[in-house]
Amino acid sequence: MSSPIKSTSVEIRDPRFTSVVGKDVTFEKLATGFLFTEGPLWHAKEKYLLFSDMPGDHLRKWSAGEGVTTFRKPCAQSNGLAWDMQGRLIVCEHATSLLTRTELNGDTTVLASHHAGKELNSPNDVVVKSDGAIYFSDPVYGRKEYYGNPRPLQLDFRGVYRLAPDGKALALMAGDFGQPNGLCFSLDEGRLYINDTDRQHIRLFDVRADGTLANGHIWAETKGEGAGAPDGMKIDSAGNVYCCGPGGIHVFAPDATCLGVVRVPEYTANFCFGDDDLRSLYVTASTSIYRFRVNLPGPSVRSGAR
């Protein structure tokens, strides 16, 4: 059973926070005892959550009826997850430095492995555009002890890539990050937010008609007390951007004003919107999975998991 945790642990920096999130939040601890949780992904049609436990090499599934079960083990130390437009699972694999797709029959297809003849660093987080193009970040965390498979780097930069809708062309979109991590599209998909863990900021890019990125600039910074850095990032149905940062989850208005911080009980790596009304945030926070409710829902589901 979940454990309710009453919390006054919200830091309100702008009055708009209360209409977006609320005056307070109540955390439910849905499950605990993991090594380090990441990559939460909600399946709207079948009402379950997938999440990665990278050090445990275990991709798990949670549902209200069954609790936590095994989805895949071993899982190549999976991190970020996404559904494509056909409802197939896209997986960032730390241990192999691959981006893969799980077909509807369970087979695995490698989507990306190399750039310019060299192995990718370690695909970390991933989003799928409505035209089927896949964008993913490629920091080095999956080549480090505990979170991945220690081995030498082949690339001398940390980039963000786009895989064309036909799955044939992989292109570098930007290669000047410290450590690129979470990413999410604006509601109209005309812009792409990408955060940089090392530099503690969020950059914003225009998405051109051909899918390439342009005019990248610093959009916001995650500032405050407590452990944490930019990592998982999502947008809600009103264009507010949620991003991990010091102390928990930072909430930014469309004008880049930080409205406030939700102070999660444990160090927070990622989160996603879920439940029928998309007003629950499922949070992967170190050893546990939490859930709390917000006032404004996440955007409608565009993938084949709807």
Image (cartoon, rainbow, N blue to C red):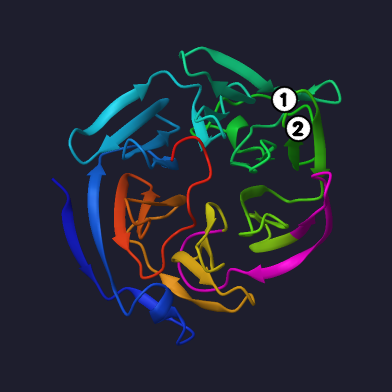
User: Residue 26 magenta-drawn?
Assistant: no
Spatial CA span between label 2 and label 1:
5 Å
The magenta stretch is 205-229
> Whole-percent x and y of residue 76?
51, 22
Place residue 173 in its image quadrant.
Answer: top right
Looking at the rendered structure, the kind of residue marked 1 is Gly
131 to 297, vertically: above or below: above
Helix, strand or loop for disc 2: loop
Looking at the rendered structure, the kind of residue marked 2 is Ala
> Whole-percent x and y of residue 109?
60, 16
Judge from the rendering whether residue 66 lies leftward or rightward of residue 177; answer left or right: left
Q: Which residue is mark 2?
A: 164
> Whole-percent x and y of residue 192?
70, 55
175 to 109, vertically: above or below: below
203 to 17, vertically: above or below: above
Circles 2 and 1, Cβ within 8 Å, touching? The answer is: yes
Place residue 46 in its image quadrant.
Answer: top left
- In the picture, which quadrant includes the C terminus? top left
Residue 156 makes an appearance in the image: no
- In the picture, which quadrant includes the N terminus? top left
At x 64%, y 24%, the residue is: 98
Residue 105 makes an appearance in the image: yes
At x 49%, y 27%, the residue is: 77
> Whole-percent x and y of residue 146?
48, 33
Judge from the rendering whether residue 167 lies leftward or rightward of residue 185; answer left or right: right
At x 72%, y 25%, the residue is: 167
At x 44%, y 72%, the residue is: 261
Between residue 170 and residue 238, name the one nearer to us: 238
Residue 167 is labelled as 1
